[in-house]
Image (spheres, rainbow, N blue to C red):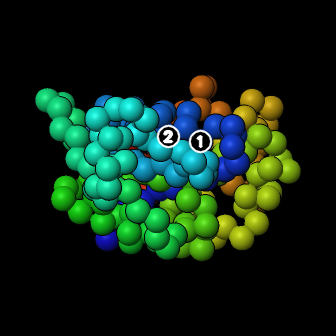
Amino acid sequence: MRKILAIIGTSKSGKTSTVEYLVTNLVKKGLKIGSAKHVHHPDFSIDLEGKDTWRHANAGSKRVICLSEDEVTIIRKEKGPEYKLDDILKLYQDDEFDLIILEGFHWIVSSRNEVMKIITAKDVEDANKRLNGTIPPILAITGKISNIHKGKSIKEIPIINIKDGGDQLLNLVMDELLINTDT
């Protein structure tokens, strides 16, 4: 079974900063990480109007692949049912990853006990809202809340500030991955 860690929280609560911290430090430890980001904006497109790939799709192509020396981008133009966790994981099937980190996707992961979770929150009320209906394992709470409440906990879940306590968060993740934290 693939190891999956979801970073879930409200907008501007610190999700991306938490993902960035974890990816940077887990890669330094030699792990191969994949990540996915949920975008809430219905009109969002990774493609830019007027660019060649946009023109391909605008002409009717349902899948546009853009290849450069250092990147491969696949743009799928489709509207369909909401993605499920298995649909997201299929996007990683061509390679072996030590960990897949999901940013967002609360509706997909909140009731999944095989997905490790880190909650990001702006304040205690925000954290409690996100914790409501989210089942363990929940490793930690981080984000803006940690600027005021670092070192405390909510429902026995530690609040960790990644700026000065990031190693604690990293060790929690490494422990869940069953990787020696002394490396």
Residue to which mark 2 is pinned: 19
Which quadrant is home to the N terminus? bottom left
Which element carries disc 2, helix, strand or loop?
helix
Q: How many other residues sit within 10 Å of disc 2, few (<14), some (14-19) or many (≥20)? A: many
Q: How many other residues sit within 10 Å of disc 1, few (<14), some (14-19) or many (≥20)? A: many
The disc placed on residue 15 is: 1
Give the camera-side residue of 32 and 77. 77
Residue 92 visible in the current orientation: yes
List x then y, in percent, for residue 51.
Answer: 34, 32
List x then y, in percent, for residue 130.
Answer: 73, 58
Residue 15 as seen in the image, left or right of residue 158: left
Seen in the picture, residue 53 relative to 64 is either above or below; the reply is above
Residue 42 as seen in the image, left or right of residue 49: right
Seen in the picture, residue 141 relative to 62 is either above or below; the reply is above
Q: Are marks 1 and 2 in contact (CB under 8 Å)?
A: yes
Which quadrant is home to the C terminus? top left
Give the camera-side residue of 173 and 9. 9
Give the camera-side residue of 167 and 125. 125
